[in-house]
Image (tube, helix red, strand yellow):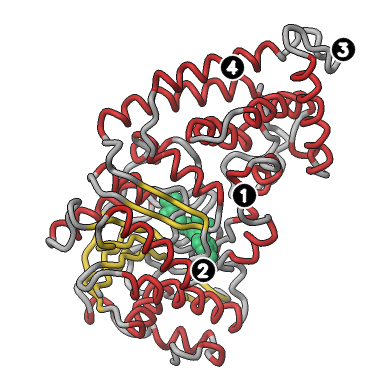
Amino acid sequence: MNWEQLNDNTIQDYIDSASYDAKEKYNCDYLDVSETISELAYLTHDYFRYYGKFPSKVAKYIIDYVQGKGVISPQTDFIFDNYNGSGTSLVEAKIAGYSSGGIDINPFGVLASNVKTNNLDDKQLQLRFCELMGKIKASDSPDMQQTFFSFEGISEADASGIRDVNKQVYLDFPDIDKWFDVDVIRELSTIKYYLLQMPHDEYREFFLLAFFSIIRRVSKAHDAEVRPHVNPKKKKRNAYEAYEKKLIEMISTMNSWNQVTAKTVESHASICDNSDSARVSGQIATLKNSYHKEMGLVISHPPYLNCFDYIPVYRLKFLWAFGFEEIYGQLSYQEIKSEEIRSYPASNDAFVNNYFRHNIDAYKAIYDNLKAGGYCCVVMGDCTINKELFSVHKMLVKAMESIGFTVDKITYRSTAYGMGRYAYKHRADYNDKDGGKQDAIMFFKK
Ligand SMILES: C[S@@+](CC[C@H](N)C(=O)[O-])C[C@H]1O[C@@H](n2cnc3c(N)ncnc32)[C@H](O)[C@@H]1O
């Protein structure tokens, strides 16, 4: 197995590289994650449904373990996540008192992470909430059904602005009727119009996240499935009501969040391809300079091989996001898609080689920037390829050793949490038996 030149490797080479017994070779233990999704969604973890996020308990477990070893402290180290997703690691870092940073290619993940880790003033939020909902409701004329755009109680400029947004949405989004009822399109267009009017600041990000978090719920798509598919039996839901409810919940949570976390403990996520070593090093250098701390711990949770690609899952949200710099400020949809690590369908040698090539580039960039003695902890699940077990985590151990990391320990975890409808058939038959698919938390040391 050649980890330097991956191009000539075959699927069989990978399978052979994982033919060792991990429990014999390494220190292994077990973590039970039997809590329900709502038990794990405390504080701001609940703000945004991010498909494929890991249980908050896993991030906490990693931080507690590495801190317990005396490797990191909040005074000297910050925590980084190079597959940041919606910022589960950064939320836990902040709760534990650590400054942190994260990168992800998905702008919705980055937005969620920044809103979830910010401390916003809840009175200010309440004021802006009343102002925004007041305007939205004033635009909702009772006779809207007959005279589609005869607004009452709002200025002509706003009425015409809303009409323009509504028209543009139909132009941006060719099959919008398939996904949303006409009333819901009008309601979402009105919310979008007022969000576009808000000054660009962290408060707008908060209201924007709430907007994107209701898109799936008010669409005609199944809520539980990963990729959007129309659910003909789904009941229509009023977007204003869903938005108002979501905001009320989020503001109340912000109140609690401010009680348990400090504004001085900073957290910054940004959009970046984690295999671009120059950019990753630049991002980490900026954090080091601004925090005056070392990167002592990296928590990392790559997309699982043969599971699903992330970006298409967010298609409906992307289509409502035109005009928002927070989402399209840096990269177009096509650019985002092309920089994402491809993980599905893993059907041939070249595909699997690319998956590992991307990960090796990403972890080399981490190795180069991690402090000596620091930890990089990778959460990874196995899959099957052509119905055969493909023990990705054991392969990754070998890849990480080729970079220079050593294994401190491997924790296997129960996966009841991940057995929902979004655990596609390729990874749905997890069990904890030897020789079956496993979900591992791997502790690598530099
Ligand atoms: C398993 S998810 C991480 C979820 C995260 N742990 C959480 O709890 O929200 C994997 C993430 O990798 C991101 N990703 C894929 N390709 C990437 C790339 N080239 N650079 C940075 N992130 C990437 C995806 O957008 C996705 O958010």
x and y, in percent, of residue 293 in the image: 25, 58
Report the residue marked by disc 1. Answer: 329
Q: What residue type is labelled 3?
A: Gln
Q: Which residue occupies 65% across, 66% down?
A: 338
Tell me the mark number nearer the camera, choosing from 1 and 2: 1
Left or right for 181, reference 68: right
Q: Quadrant of the C terminus?
A: bottom left
Q: What residue type is labelled 1?
A: Gly
Report the residue marked by disc 4. Answer: 133
Disc 1 CB within 8 Å of nearest ligand 1 atom:
no
Tell me the mark number nearer the camera, choosing from 3 and 2: 3
Of label 3 and label 2, which has the lower sequence position?
Answer: 3
Q: CB of mark 4 within 8 Å of CB of mark 2?
A: no
Report the residue marked by disc 2. Answer: 305
Report the residue marked by disc 3. Answer: 146
Q: Nearer the viewer, residue 300 or 234?
A: 300
Q: CB of mark 4 within 8 Å of CB of mark 3?
A: no
Element class at badge 1? loop
* Vertical placement of residue 411 versus 267, above or below: below
Of label 1 and label 2, which has the lower sequence position?
Answer: 2
